[in-house]
Image (tube, rainbow, N blue to C red):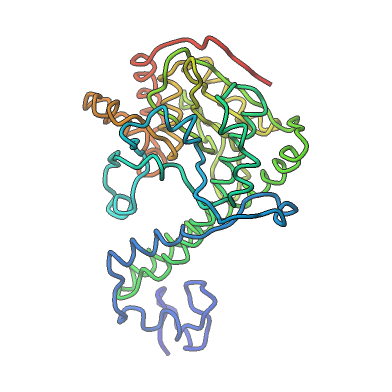
């Protein structure tokens, strides 16, 4: 009787040890003798996991969908990306698949502003209907525009997590032609990615169920926000959501263990005519997020502090190309260090020191604070 990857005897018709649900003979029995997955095939497969289309409007609005699914900007091209665009390009902080596969240092690179921050998550009609005020007006720091920014970010996060689920499923086939130990390791990585994305998706769907009534009725009482205005033009723009495990002073807030329900905050850096807003929105009952925001306000309430939050937590972040090129190498290394948080390392004390340096490099006090 053949043995599985764990050395246990397993019949050909028994369920495979990897948890795929397939029979052992149709899954991993001969996996080590199969043709290995080529690097280009792996990269293309991972990228294709995010090539799907859907409209993220509320289910009872779907009958209104019209036009093609569009490449919706999670950061307004007119009112956010335009601030950091030069010659039609921005600098992207998003690591590419090759860097992730090779465990390389994340290098920032030019990206077309037309493609920056996009996801195929809305039909043309609903992208315009829902976010018209956000796209046609400067961000004012008020509750409605803060909510619309967070809502658009939530839809993008849901889209990304669905893509990660598809990518994890593709990753299960990456152990073809590998030895038994490599098969175990690859299956464990794919399983961890799948479980993590699934838990995150479940938490985001719960938030969506809170967002939709507010989107339809304009009642934002379930949410709290804190917005800080700085009277300087931003060097970068950003919008995303994250689950803070530590505050910016490196104090522990919450475990990100998959068995633990976590608290989420939406953060953005959005320009207006006088400077920019650093904007936080979260579920009002999420007291740990309130502690995170209070710590930022107390210790790092400056343009540099806002940059530090974005670089540490938000991959959907873009900067002016000439700004990046003008940075000294030490500052570039600091930016890369922060943006590698939770990808290659979890050095929260090191991150605190870097954010402190950025606060000194890009100082300034908030001239307006809006909270609810």
At 60% from the left edge and 50% from the top edge, which residue is drawn? 259
Q: Position of residue 67 (x, y in %)?
A: 59, 55
Q: Position of residue 321 (x, y in %)?
A: 30, 31
Work out whether 79 lies above or below 127.
Answer: above
Work out whether 265 lies above or below 115.
Answer: above
Q: Which quarter of the figure is the C terminus placed in?
A: top right
The tally of labels here is 0
Farthest front residue in view: 67
Quarter occupied by residue 39: bottom left
Quarter occupied by residue 315: top left
Answer with left or right where residue 58 lies relative to residue 89.
right
In this rendered view, identify the residue nearer to me: 138 or 208. Answer: 138
Q: Which quarter of the figure is the N terminus placed in?
A: bottom left
In this rendered view, identify the residue nearer to me: 203 or 215. Answer: 215
Answer with left or right where residue 101 lies relative to residue 152.
left
Q: Position of residue 334 (x, y in %)?
A: 30, 28
Quarter occupied by residue 184: bottom left
At 39% from the left edge and 58% from the top edge, which residue is drawn? 47
At 30% from the left edge and 42% from the top edge, which residue is drawn? 106
Q: Position of residue 362 (x, y in %)?
A: 37, 16
At 55% from the left edge and 18% from the top edge, which residue is drawn? 228
In this rendered view, identify the residue nearer to me: 51 or 359. Answer: 51
In this rendered view, identify the residue nearer to me: 254 or 230. Answer: 230
Answer with left or right where residue 206 lies relative to residue 348.
right
């Amino acid at each position: 009787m053949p043995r599985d990857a764990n050395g246990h005897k397993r019949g050909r018709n028994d369920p495979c040890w990897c948890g795929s649900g397939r029979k052992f003979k149709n899954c991993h029995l001969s996996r080590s003798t199969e043709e290995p997955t080529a690097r280009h095939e792996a990269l293309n497969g991972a990228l294709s996991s995010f090539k799907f289309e859907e409209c993220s409007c509320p289910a009872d609005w779907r009958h209104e969908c019209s036009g093609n699914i569009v490449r919706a900007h999670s950061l307004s091209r007119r009112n956010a990306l335009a601030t950091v665009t030069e010659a039609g390009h921005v600098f992207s902080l998003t690591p590419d698949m090759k860097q992730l596969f090779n465990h390389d240092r994340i290098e920032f690179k030019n990206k077309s502003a037309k493609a920056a921050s996009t996801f195929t998550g809305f039909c043309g009609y609903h992208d315009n209907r829902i976010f018209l005020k956000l796209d046609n007006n400067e961000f004012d720091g008020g509750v409605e525009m803060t909510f619309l920014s967070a809502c658009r970010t939530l839809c993008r996060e849901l889209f990304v997590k669905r893509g990660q689920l598809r990518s994890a499923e593709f990753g299960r086939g990456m152990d073809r032609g590998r030895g038994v130990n490599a098969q175990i390791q690859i299956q464990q990585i794919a399983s961890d990615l799948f479980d993590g994305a699934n838990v995150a998706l479940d938490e985001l769907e719960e938030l969506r169920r809170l967002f939709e009534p507010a989107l339809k009725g304009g009642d934002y009482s379930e949410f709290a926000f804190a917005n800080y205005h700085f009277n300087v033009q931003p060097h970068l723009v950003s919008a995303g959501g994250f689950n803070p495990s530590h505050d910016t002073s490196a104090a522990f807030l919450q475990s990100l263990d998959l068995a633990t329900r976590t608290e989420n905050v939406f953060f953005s850096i959005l320009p207006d005519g006088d400077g920019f807003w650093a904007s936080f929105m979260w579920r009002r009952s999420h007291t740990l997020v309130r502690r995170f925001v209070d710590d930022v306000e107390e210790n790092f309430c400056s343009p540099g502090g806002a940059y530090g939050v974005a670089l540490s937590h938000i991959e959907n972040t873009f900067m002016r190309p000439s700004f990046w090129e003008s940075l000294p190498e030490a500052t570039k290394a600091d930016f890369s260090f922060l943006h590698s948080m939770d990808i290659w390392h979890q050095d929260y004390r090191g991150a605190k020191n870097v954010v402190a340096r950025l606060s000194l490099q890009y100082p300034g006090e908030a001239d307006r604070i809006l909270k609810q």
